[in-house]
Image (cartoon, coloured by chain):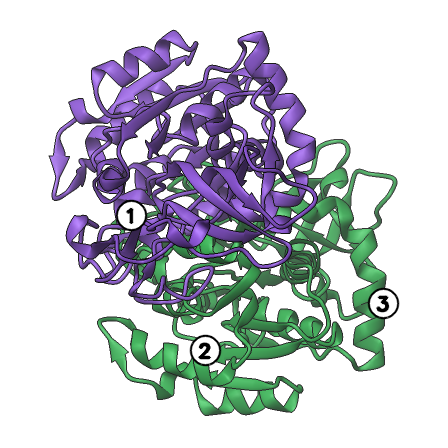
Chain colours: A purple, B green
Amino acid sequence: MSQQRINRRWLYVQRPAHESTAEHYQLDETTPAPTPADGELLIQAVWFSVDPYMRIQQSSFRTWEAPHPLNTVQGGGVVGVVVESRSPAFAPGDYVSAYTGWQLYATVAASAVRKLNPKDAPIEYSLGVLGMPGRTAYFGLLDAGKPKAGETVVVSAASGAVGLLVAQIAKIQKCRVVGIAGGQEKCNYLKSLGLDEVIDYKALPRSKDDVDYDAILAALKQACPQGVDIYFDNVGGTTTDAVFNLINLRARVIICGQITQYNGKLDSVEMGPRFLHRLIYTRATIQGILARDYVDRMDEMLPVMIDWLNSGKLKYEQTVVDGFEQLPSALNALFHGKNVGKMLVRA
Amino acid sequence: MSQQRINRRWLYVQRPAHESTAEHYQLDETTPAPTPADGELLIQAVWFSVDPYMRIQQSSFRTWEAPHPLNTVQGGGVVGVVVESRSPAFAPGDYVSAYTGWQLYATVAASAVRKLNPKDAPIEYSLGVLGMPGRTAYFGLLDAGKPKAGETVVVSAASGAVGLLVAQIAKIQKCRVVGIAGGQEKCNYLKSLGLDEVIDYKALPRSKDDVDYDAILAALKQACPQGVDIYFDNVGGTTTDAVFNLINLRARVIICGQITQYNGKLDSVEMGPRFLHRLIYTRATIQGILARDYVDRMDEMLPVMIDWLNSGKLKYEQTVVDGFEQLPSALNALFHGKNVGKMLVRA
């Protein structure tokens, strides 16, 4: 009887001014699990996604939607198992991916979940390479970036959930790939994946709370002797400022993330050098992307990604934190670069 | 005998740190007119173009080409008459448009000029609506901007050579058009052309040497209750900063000019608020354009523009300064908004 199950829920209760930490959340363990209505499922989450975009939703203004409401369960993707089904399409024991957030139990319309076949791939891949970060990388690079063999592609946060895929997909497209990541270990790993050049930004001097502009510019100049044709940006800040000096004719800049700005600088805007004039010289384009725009094209992506994974062309990495109670600190850890690849919490 | 003609030439002799003025030029009246070689023409310029891009070329770094070399004739478009022809395709008395710069006489390859028919349109239109500024406006708006009926189009420097055309072409496309210009007279004129809203930025408070950010943002909000679908930018600076707050889903920002930055801020870069994160929320694109990219498509544009001119759908304005010796001061006057429409100097 689902009514007798007690839920565990992380409520988002306070807007952070800078970093998002456990103090902005409250663990509720007093509410019974809900009961599914007709056409709904009761699912028990097994894997939880933590993503940088969650911090964007904690800003004070409308972004792609209204700010995350306070005193509600933190939204997010999960992989769960069906505990109770009131839909003929699902049976208890089925695995699904859903967007039910940081709670152990949730009811969800059967039409709003995707059934997972554990024989295709590990079920948690649907939160990463075969899910939201995967399609961000795949369509962001291929559809928005339109890479051509031999072009130079720079990827910031190249060891992150999206960047790690972008860098490898760009190599599959026979591009010259330059990755930027923090720390020798991450950089060595990226080199082992075949990236042509890797820049360890943590080895460079810092200025205020970002990498020093002159230092990252010098490193990029050295790594990109032919300039930059595609910049897949996950970080923003001075790294991105520097790249704009090196963009080639008809370069494509893909704005996927701006993680340097999320901890307070969306609300209290930081100043940076004006660079739009450079677009006139280069006729470059800058385009923002968001994973949801490509939801309808998952069937196009999945067979390709699965084939790349199975053939070993694409390596996939996850950083797993155990324990539902770790969710807020796992989110925070993203902003300290504690992850390689996709960060997940296992209940 | 062309050898006996004495040329008049404005040499660009000194890089300006801020405004470009007569002191950065030197008038040379000691050199004989050149003699055309086989396949060349000797032309006598009648109309000279002065354009904001000339100040970009006076920056210290490579833009779309190397900086304008010192101690050479200032480059630029002219309309001239053929004085001597060593090409079977031209006869003395023919009118041509050419890129021979600020000199009264020049030789030029017959293949590098365009013959003008004074019956089609006034010959000087080939430096404006039927030339470089015209194709910048036409292809920049239609090709890069892809306007749809009912969309809100904001045009900065809407009374300038390009902006005045963009604003009217956007009205022809049945868009809601908001123009930004300096001074009541220009704004009244823009309203008389059918623009839906006009913002007189000179009536707003200033901050440092640009329009005040909060003031222009408030004016834009009022003028654009449905947000901004296309921003055709000729100015940059705080006006552009403000527009980025109002861009709609899949907005297109066309970077045609950044005139607020040209007088020194290309070399000594100004700081402005970071805005790239907004592209993620809106999946907007920013694209730089340059007239030369559309040179091959003039035959596509000219009949349309001539038809619009003849039918009165498109009004064309020129600001004419008389006297070859006025060229440097006419260039400077562009940066003080002294022109409505295309600025020309008549020899």
Rounded to the nearest angstrom, the CA distance separating label 2 from label 3 is: 29 Å
Q: Quadrant of residue A192?
A: top left
> Residue drawn 37% across and 64% down?
A67
Where does the image place residue B333, in percent across and percent down from the top left?
42, 71
Q: Nearer the viewer, residue B121 or B299?
A: B299
In the visual, does A305 lie left or right of B312?
A: left
Q: Name the residue tied to disc 2.
A: B338
Q: Nearer the viewer, residue A346 or A142?
A: A346
Residues beneath discs 1 and 3 located on the same chain: yes
Q: Chain of mark 3?
A: B
Q: Element at badge 3?
A: loop
Q: Element at badge 1?
A: loop
> Considering only vertical position in the picture, is A156 above or below A177?
below
> Residue drawn 49% across and 72% down?
B157
Where does the image place residue A308, in percent across and percent down from the top left?
59, 15
Q: Say the numbered circle drawn on residue B267.
A: 1
Residues beneath discs 2 and 3 located on the same chain: yes
Q: Chain of mark 2?
A: B
The amino acid pointed to by label 3 is Asp
Q: Chain of mark 1?
A: B
The amino acid pointed to by label 2 is Lys
> Residue drawn 37% across and 25% down?
A341
Quarter of the image where the C terminus of chain B is located: bottom right
Where does the image place residue B2, in percent across and percent down from the top left?
66, 46
Q: Nearer the viewer, residue A45 or B216?
A: A45
Labels 2 and 3: the sequence-earlier one: 3
